[in-house]
């Protein structure tokens, strides 16, 4: 959880608060740039997904949220639920900024985890939802301390109570955050991964009751250290077409284009219940997404998958310009859910990401791609040969270009609206291994978001873009084969 420490007044503890809501009129969720199939809050600022957990038919999405404004601040946990990871119901704020009982200073609710305590290990009841999060204690515009705290719910996340003996873990550090907790079945215990951001270190703890934690190991690797490390996650994934699994440690921090931007990286290796060790001594970073707008992704807890795959959601924005993107009355979106596995390639194990359930939103087929005007979300699958491109354009001169040139798939947003921040105009690329003669691309476009999945998700580029006019036309350059295309049905209006 990031990033900017601001000054706020002291707030008293509030268990539940109603999220500020915009009037549900005929234009509900129809504002300029408003995504129609990606999750966004009704109003105000949102960043990292938190506490992704499945319970009794509901996928819970908690997220970093400012109840009072459209830029970062007053961090609390917003809350929504879904039965299919596509259609979301907004719920009241789950956890609000509060007054620390020990220091009497204001405490923001930073990133963390939610788990289902099936066996009542913590003593709050069988199947209680337990949230473990970073308490960020601050005063007079200065961050003082970060420690880990707990809250619990016995009504499926509708109301929450802070644990009276918080904090549950503290090493008396200013920067010590973002706990990811999961149940480790082989040793019948809970495991926590969290970071010491400025030391590029992930620490591992274990517990039998979610209340008392013991340090078991740590991981430090050169990886990408151009930005501080945040939001770690640790999970076991199946290897495609092989009867085995590997462990993945993912975290947020550096970006392929250097320290000005943030992204996500991952390591593949083994976990023995105490610590993670990666397979190779190679320090070259592996990136989750090669675009500028995918950060803080974590996977769902308690969501059983028949092939042991995991489902990840990430934050679609970037700290470099996140507070300035031209949206109102909200800022930021979440990615579409991605199903994760590993592919065993000639260059090692590679994270493979595929969209979950998007077919449910398909409407009419796009039958004549260069003749139709697209006014809403859509998807295209295409095969791009060398020196070809798919260009999204409109009559105002806006242009977003997806191309395959010299062995790299690129997304160029230079000719979109960029005047709100000098670093927004950019071109991002993914170098396709082996320099093949052609590549498969699945493109999902949603008002101001493009997610590009390359060669069945072995590479992904996620980008925000802003057109002066909402209508989009598609222009083909070179030998591009459009395999199929669909208009997609929005999820916010029936």
Image (spheres, rainbow, N blue to C red):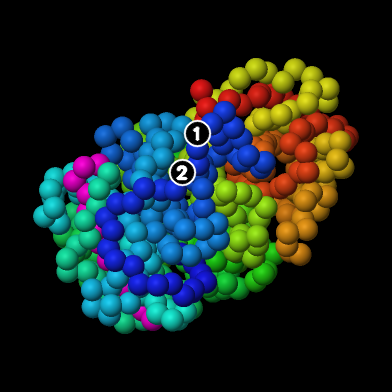
Task: Assign a secondary structure to mark 1.
Answer: loop
Residue located at (72% from left, 20% from top): 366
Pointer 2: residues within 10 angstroms few (<14), some, or many (20+)?
few
Residue corresponding to mark 2: 21
User: Which disc number belongs to residue 24?
Assistant: 1
Viewer-nearest residue: 143 or 289: 143
Above or below, 147 against 332 in this view is: below
State whether the magenta stretch is mostly helix, strand or loop: strand
Image quadrant in which you'd find residue 467: top right
Q: Which of 266 and 299 is in front in this view?
A: 299
Instruction: Report whether 166 appears left or right of 438.
Output: left
Q: Is there any visible trace of residue 323 in the rendered image? A: yes
Task: Please give the range of residues in magenta.
Answer: 144-156
Q: Position of 391 compared to 355: left or right?
A: right
Separation (CA) of disc 2 from disc 1:
8 Å
Above or below residue 212? Residue 373 is: above
* For residue 47, side relative to residue 439 (left or right): left
Against 260, is 181 above or below? above
Q: Image check: 144 left or right of 161? A: right
The local crowd at label 1, few if under 14, some if 14 to 19, many if 20 or more residues have their Cα within 10 Å, is few
Q: Do the residues labelled 2 and 1 touch (CB within 8 Å)?
A: yes
> Which of 52/405 is in front?
52
x, y percent for residue 340: 48, 44
Q: Can residue 275 be seen in this view?
A: no
Q: Where is residue 445 in the image (x, y as percent from the top left)?
A: 67, 37
Q: Looking at this view, is 372 or 412 the one in front?
A: 372
């Amino acid at each position: 959880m990031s990033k900017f420490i601001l000054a706020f007044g002291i707030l008293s503890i509030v268990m539940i608060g109603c999220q500020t809501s915009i009037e549900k009129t005929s234009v509900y969720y129809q504002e300029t740039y408003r995504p129609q199939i990606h999750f966004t809050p009704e109003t105000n600022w949102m960043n990292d997904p938190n506490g992704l957990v499945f319970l009794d038919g509901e996928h819970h999405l908690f997220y970093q949220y400012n109840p009072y404004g459209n830029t970062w601040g007053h961090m609390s946990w917003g809350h929504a639920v879904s039965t299919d990871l596509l259609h979301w119901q907004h719920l009241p704020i789950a956890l609000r900024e509060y007054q620390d009982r020990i220091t009497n200073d204001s405490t923001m609710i930073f990133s963390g985890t939610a788990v289902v305590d099936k066996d009542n290990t913590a003593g709050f009841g069988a199947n209680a939802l337990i949230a473990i999060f970073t308490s960020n204690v601050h005063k007079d515009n200065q961050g003082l301390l970060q420690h880990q705290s707990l809250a619990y719910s016995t009504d499926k996340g509708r109301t929450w109570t802070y644990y009276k003996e918080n904090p549950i873990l503290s090493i008396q550090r200013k920067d010590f955050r973002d706990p990811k907790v999961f149940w480790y079945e082989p040793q019948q215990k809970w495991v926590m991964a969290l970071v010491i951001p400025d030391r590029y270190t992930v620490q591992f703890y274990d517990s039998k009751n979610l209340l008392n934690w013991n340090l078991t190991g740590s991981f430090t690797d050169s990886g990408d250290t151009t930005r501080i490390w945040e939001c770690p996650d640790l999970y076991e994934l199946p290897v495609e077409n092989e009867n085995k699994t590997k462990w993945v440690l993912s975290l947020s921090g550096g970006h392929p284009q250097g320290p000005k931007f943030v992204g996500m990286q991952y390591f593949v290796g083994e976990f023995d219940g105490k610590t993670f060790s990666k397979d190779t001594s190679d320090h070259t970073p592996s990136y989750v997404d090669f675009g500028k707008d995918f950060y803080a992704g974590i996977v769902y807890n308690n969501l059983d998958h028949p092939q042991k795959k995991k489902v990840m959601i990430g934050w679609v924005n970037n700290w470099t310009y996140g507070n300035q993107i031209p949206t109102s009355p909200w800022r930021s979106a979440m990615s579409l859910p991605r199903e994760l596995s590993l592919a065993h390639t000639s260059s090692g194990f590679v994270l493979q990401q595929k969209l979950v359930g998007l077919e449910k939103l398909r409407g009419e087929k796009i039958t004549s791609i260069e003749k139709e005007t697209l006014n809403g979300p859509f998807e295209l699958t295409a095969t791009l040969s060398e020196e070809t491109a798919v260009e999204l354009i409109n009559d105002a001169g806006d242009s977003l270009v997806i191309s395959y040139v010299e062995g790299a798939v690129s997304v160029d947003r230079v000719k979109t609206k960029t005047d709100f921040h000098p670093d927004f105009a950019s071109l991002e690329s993914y170098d396709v291994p082996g320099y093949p003669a052609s590549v498969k691309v699945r493109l999902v476009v949603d008002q101001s978001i493009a997610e590009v999945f390359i060669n069945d998700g072995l590479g992904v580029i996620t980008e925000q873009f802003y057109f002066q006019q909402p209508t989009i036309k598609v222009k083909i350059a070179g030998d591009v084969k459009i395999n199929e295309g669909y208009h997609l049905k929005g999820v916010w209006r029936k």
